[in-house]
Amino acid sequence: MCRNIKMLHNFEPPATEVEIRAAALQYVRKVSGYRQPSQANEAAFTAAVDEISAATTTLLEALTTTAPPKDREAEAAKARERSAHRFAR
């Protein structure tokens, strides 16, 4: 899985449309191999991002869990700690 795509389920507050679209964009970039598509492929690229954003929104709204919601700041702090440990020299 692409490291830039963040988990969006079970956070308080819930994922925003911007976060969902950013994840969809990263996914399409990874699958297509394009960071920025050519003009000839731009419509297909944008349509794919739109469709994946919609599917992701539907998925997130349908998922249920009994686990308590995660705190975004606490998860970000854990990620920074893992990164510092991984890249410590």
Image (cartoon, rainbow, N blue to C red):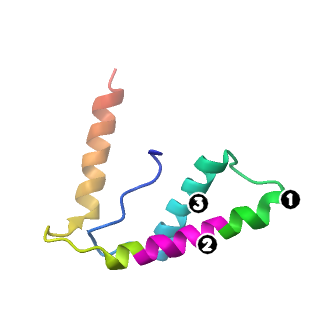
Please name the residue that numbered disc 1 is placed on: 40
Among numbered discs 3 and 1, the one appearing first in the sequence: 3
Q: Closer to the observer: label 3 or label 1?
A: 1
Residue at x 33%, y 37% (from the top left corner): 83
Classified by dominant secondary structure, the portion drawn in magenta counts as helix
Q: Secondary structure at mark 2?
A: helix
Category of crowding for the residue at label 2, using alpha-carbon neighbours closer than 10 angstroms: few (below 14), some (14–19), many (at least 20): some
Task: Indicate the amino acid at tag 2.
Answer: Asp
Q: Secondary structure at mark 1?
A: helix
Contact between labelled residues 1 and 3, with CB atoms less than 8 Å apart:
no
Please name the residue that numbered disc 3 is placed on: 25
The outermost residue toward the right is 40
The residue lying toward the viewer, choosing from 77 and 18, is 18
Residue at x 44%, y 75% (from the top left corner): 57
Category of crowding for the residue at label 1, using alpha-carbon neighbours closer than 10 angstroms: few (below 14), some (14–19), many (at least 20): few
Among numbered discs 3 and 2, the one appearing first in the sequence: 3
Task: Indicate the amino acid at tag 1.
Answer: Ala
Contact between labelled residues 2 and 3, with CB atoms less than 8 Å apart:
no
Q: Find the distance from the CA under tag 1 to the CA under tag 2.
A: 17 Å
Is-magenta flag for residue 49? yes
Residue 44 position in % (x across, y down): 74, 64
Tell me the magenta residue range: 48-58
Please name the residue that numbered disc 2 is placed on: 50
Name the quadrant containing residue 87. Answer: top left
